[in-house]
Image (spheres, rainbow, N blue to C red):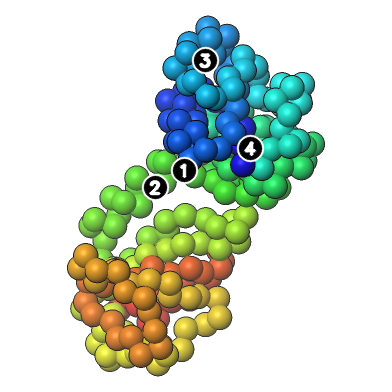
Amino acid sequence: MKIVIAGGGSVGTSIALDLLDRNHDVTLLEQVSATAEKLKTLLPGVTVMAADACEYSSLSAADVRSADVVIAATGDDEDNLVVSWLSKQEFGVPRVISRINNARNEWLFNESWGVDVSVSTPALITSLVDEAVEVGAIIKLMKLAHGRMRLIEITLAASAPAVVENLTLAELNLPDTVRVVAIVRGDQPIQPASTTHFLELDHVILIARENATQDCASAFIG
């Protein structure tokens, strides 16, 4: 695939190297000319351009219109939103992935700004901290499907109805807005089936509509 990355910082360069190892055609845009020149040496095989990815002319020069994926990976949320919007609205890129630097800005990174998938490192780290200490709480992991769906995790407490009543997945009668996609028991991943029972400290991974993350509370939170 042809992939264009905006931002030549540590995140952008790491992504470029990983994608190059996977035999993708990678172009990286870096605004600071001196940095771009260094990256040309450090990233052999990657097409590095000294250009402002927030400018239409720069994206056009990088032939973004033919890209399969654009990754907005700068350290500035405003820049990432501009890159995402231009890539989607002006160049029709099929898939736009954007980095979120400040978790407070997460609400902006949606389809209206051209973002197909947003990745918030601060929010992910917070979720991992919550996961380590929270039992019986809904931990929001990431958004999917243009923000319409949410991947969530619940670590079951002994008081969870699913545990107390020894209910199977089928007996939970979860609403259509929620699906159990995996269970992690100890260090063993389990594919959920209709006959699956739940145990205390099971990590239940669910996908739910963005406005329906509480719909699973009656089954998994005591």
Query: Which residue lies under the disc numbered 3?
Result: 40
The numbered mark, 2 or 4, whose residue comes first in the sequence reads 4
Amino acid type, residue under disc 4 in the picture: Lys
**Chain-order first, disc 4 or disc 1:** 4
| 4 and 3 marks in contact (CB < 8 Å) | no
- Tag 3 or tag 4, which sits nearer the N-term? 4
Question: Of discs 3 and 1, which sits in the foreground?
Answer: 3
Dot 3 amino acid type: Lys
- Dot 2 amino acid type: Leu
Q: Which residue is mark 4?
A: 2
Instruction: Read off the residue under disc 1.
Output: 120
Q: Is residue 126 above or below residue 17?
A: below
Of tags 2 and 3, which is closer to the observer?
A: 3
Image coords of residue 88 (percent x, y): 73, 41
Label 1: few (<14), some (14–19) or many (≥20) C-alpha neighbours in 10 Å: many
Q: Of helix, strand and loop, which one carries label 1?
A: strand
What secondary structure is found at the residue carrying circle 3?
helix
Compare residues 139 and 85 and report the one nearer the observer: 85
Q: Give the mark, 3 or 1, whose residue is nearer the N terminus.
A: 3
Amino acid, disc 1: Ser
Give the CA separation, mark 2 to mark 3.
31 Å
Residue drawn at (28%, 91%) of the image: 165
* Spatial separation of the CA atoms under disc 4 and disc 3: 18 Å
- Tell me if label 2 and label 1 are in contact, CB under 8 Å: yes
Q: CA distance from mark 2 to mark 1?
A: 6 Å
**Number of the label disc, if any, that sits on residue 124:** 2
Q: CA separation, marks 3 and 1? A: 28 Å
Q: Earlier in the sequence, mark 2 or mark 3?
A: 3
In the figure, is residue 20 to the left or right of 84? left
Q: From the image, state whether disc 2 or disc 4 is nearer to you.
A: 4
